[in-house]
Amino acid sequence: MGMPTIKLAVFDMAGTTIHDESYVAKAFQGAMRRNGYPGVTLQEATDRMGYPKPLAIRELLEIHEPSPDAITPWLVDRIHTDFVDGMVNFYANEPGIRPVADAEAVFDALHSMGIKVALDTGFSRDITDVILARVGWTDGRFLDATAASDEVERGRPYPDMIRKIMADLGIDDPASVIKIGDTEVDVNEGHNAGCLMSIGVTGGAFTREQLLPHRPTHVLDSLSELIPLLKPHALAGQVS
């Protein structure tokens, strides 16, 4: 038996493949503030990056809303709509929106190794599409599939988005899939999906020290470190 062959790499978006300077956490904090919750800290928002946003809003309300009866689906939806509107406007207009430095070269290298490339995200599809258009990733050159958190029953850390991508690409075995992301829910999503590797990358929302307790199979300081890590697996797949 040789090494397992990797067929698919699933990357997170903000903080992993899309440059993020706490943009998402700050937008999240702003939506909470505008809806009457000025006490939400940037750290509390950052800690929930990667989660489906309505779930993150509910968790923050449970901390900052003294009356549990006030935490209604209507309130969660109102704050989420505010957040989405702000994020769509931000990603459409902010000058600094760009891929992480190594991202496109890594996508190309993976494709040359016979590995498909996909993105999944805690964003809803409307924000996801604005970002993909902004960085020029809509033409199929870099990405084989994408999944947003509102397209599945359960967002991260559940494995639903990875399973959707696998189904879309006709890949059956999660042991031929790897997951790469910058938060604990990315790492746990990979574990929960049964991925061969669930890789944490620093430079996004979480540091190496914050990622390690979640048992990533590897922690990388840049995406380019992924390529030498995968070479043995790709070569195994090329040998007839």
Image: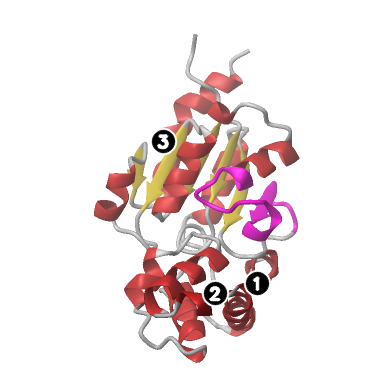
- Camera sees residue 124: yes
**Where is residue 152 drawn, in percent x and y?**
67, 52
Residue 229: x and y, percent? 41, 34
Q: Give the class, few, some or many, for how many residues have Cα within 10 Å of label 2's Cα (few <14, many ≥20).
A: some
Q: Is residue 210 left or right of residue 100?
A: left
Verify CB contact (< 8 Å) between mark 2 and mark 1. yes
The magenta-colored residue range is: 139-161
Q: Which amino acid does the dot numbered 2 rest on?
A: Ile
- Is residue 51 toward the left or the right of residue 225 in the image? right
Q: Is 152 drawn above or below residue 40 in the view shown?
A: above
Does the magenta-highlighted stretch encompass residue 150? yes
For the point 55% across and 82% down, the residue is: 95
**Quarter of the view holding residue 130:** bottom right
Kind of residue at disc 1: Arg
Q: Badge 3: how crowded within 10 Å, few (<14), some, or many (20+)?
A: few
Could you give the CA–CA distance between mark 2 and mark 3, rounded to whole angstroms? 28 Å
The answer to whether residue 46 is magenta is: no
Question: Are the residues at dot 2 and dot 3 in contact (C-beta closer than 8 Å)?
Answer: no
Where residue 46 appears, x then y in whole percent? 39, 69
Q: Which residue matches tag 3? A: 228
Looking at the rendering, in which quadrant would you find the C terminus? top right
Residue, disc 1: 134
Label 2 residue SS = loop
Mark positioned earlier in the residue sequence (3 or 1):
1
Figure quadrant of residue 206: bottom left
Of residues 35 and 187, the one nearer the viewer is 35
Disc on res. 97: 2
Q: Residue at x 37, y 36 (%)?
A: 217
Residue at 47% of width from left, 18% of height from top?
Answer: 3
Secondary structure of residue under mark 1:
helix
Q: State the residue at coordinates (41%, 55%).
A: 182
Q: Which one is nearer the viewer's eye here, 78 or 192?
A: 78
